[in-house]
Amino acid sequence: MCSNFGKGNNMGKKLNTETAEYRAIRKDFWHDPFIEELDAKGKLLYLYLFTSPYTDNFGVVEASRKKISFETGLSAQDVEKCLADFEAAKKIITDGGWIWMVNFIKNQTGTHARIIDGLAKVAPSAVPTKKLAESICSRYPQVYSKEMVEGDTYTIPTPLGFHTFTYTCPEFGIWKLEDSKGKTKEEGADGMPPCPHQAILDAYHEILPELAKMKTWGDDRQNKLRTRWRERWAARKYRTQSEGIDYFRRLFAYMRDSNFLMGRTTDRYGKSFMASLDWIVLPRNFAKIIEGRYHDTGMEAGA
């Protein structure tokens, strides 16, 4: 099925695809451990590749190293070094003058109809090289591959009669999808159960009553908790919703042993810090908690 990618008349020619006028950058972009470890030059180049006018809707960048150097102000040597570091970290794949941003589809795909339509219009033959085409198909097997999808899916027919674009890539986990009336529904992927927001909120309030009460739980907080839920599920910490709820109950019980998280310590000014659920589910904070940065041992060592 994926062998049809990259074999059209576009091989080695300019991509004939529509690109978005705007690119969305998540606020927690700067909390990504990979981004945190980059130096200023690396951060600039990585952000440039995501937002450049030469990046198509698949995340394939068509820009010479000289062009990248000129527009970013980085030296040619710095560009080559950063790209080599990105490829070693499996964040990009290069093939000659082409660069594919591996996580571009995951981070840029949204539920707005115009974004969906734009992605659906990108024909398989528009992928410029066989190497990049196979890489895209390997990482996102459901893209333009209706036959590879099992179960009920949310699909959009392409105008050129190719396979159907679907939003059930296992890597994505749960998506919010807009129906024709603008309402949303949650779709699970690869057997992952939906994130039980209310049950986790109830467990947090029950086990950690000293901490801040969560009086609201809007979209931003839901998205962060849902992401943590997906990460722990992908790490095989639970396989059912009830097991997942139990995992978070153990996490909250584990937090009680941390004097710092529970506000039982003070700094030199006599002030103390107390965690809250919206703080807990931030990616950097969540990682530190389960790694035991605020304890003597990691949470998952005894989970």
Image (cartoon, rainbow, N blue to C red):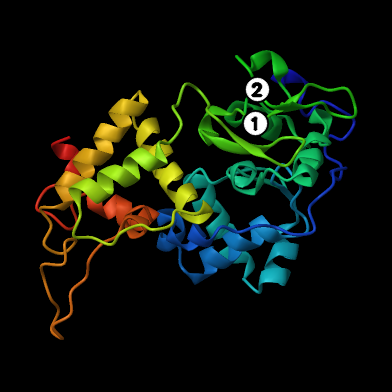
Determine contact: label 2, label 1, CB under 8 Å: yes
Residue furthest bottom as drawn: 269
Horizontal side of 40 relative to 185 (left or right) equals left
Report the amino acid beneath label 1. Answer: Tyr
Coordinates of residue 247 in the picture (x, y in percent): 26, 35
Q: Which residue occupies 65% across, 25% down?
A: 142
Residue 30's disc is none
Report the amino acid beneath label 2. Answer: Thr
Coordinates of residue 269 in the picture (x, y in percent): 15, 86
N-term-proximal mark, 2 vs 1: 2
**Foreground of the two, 286 or 133:** 286
The answer to whether residue 294 shows anywhere in this view is yes
Neighbourhood count class around disc 1 (C-alpha, 10 Å): few under 14, some 14–19, many 20 upward: many
Q: Which residue occupies 73% across, 19% down?
A: 3
Q: Quadrant of the C terminus?
A: top left
Residue on which the image places disc 2: 153
Residue on which the image places disc 1: 167
**Foreground of the two, 23 or 183:** 183
Task: Identify the secondary structure beneath mark 2.
Answer: loop
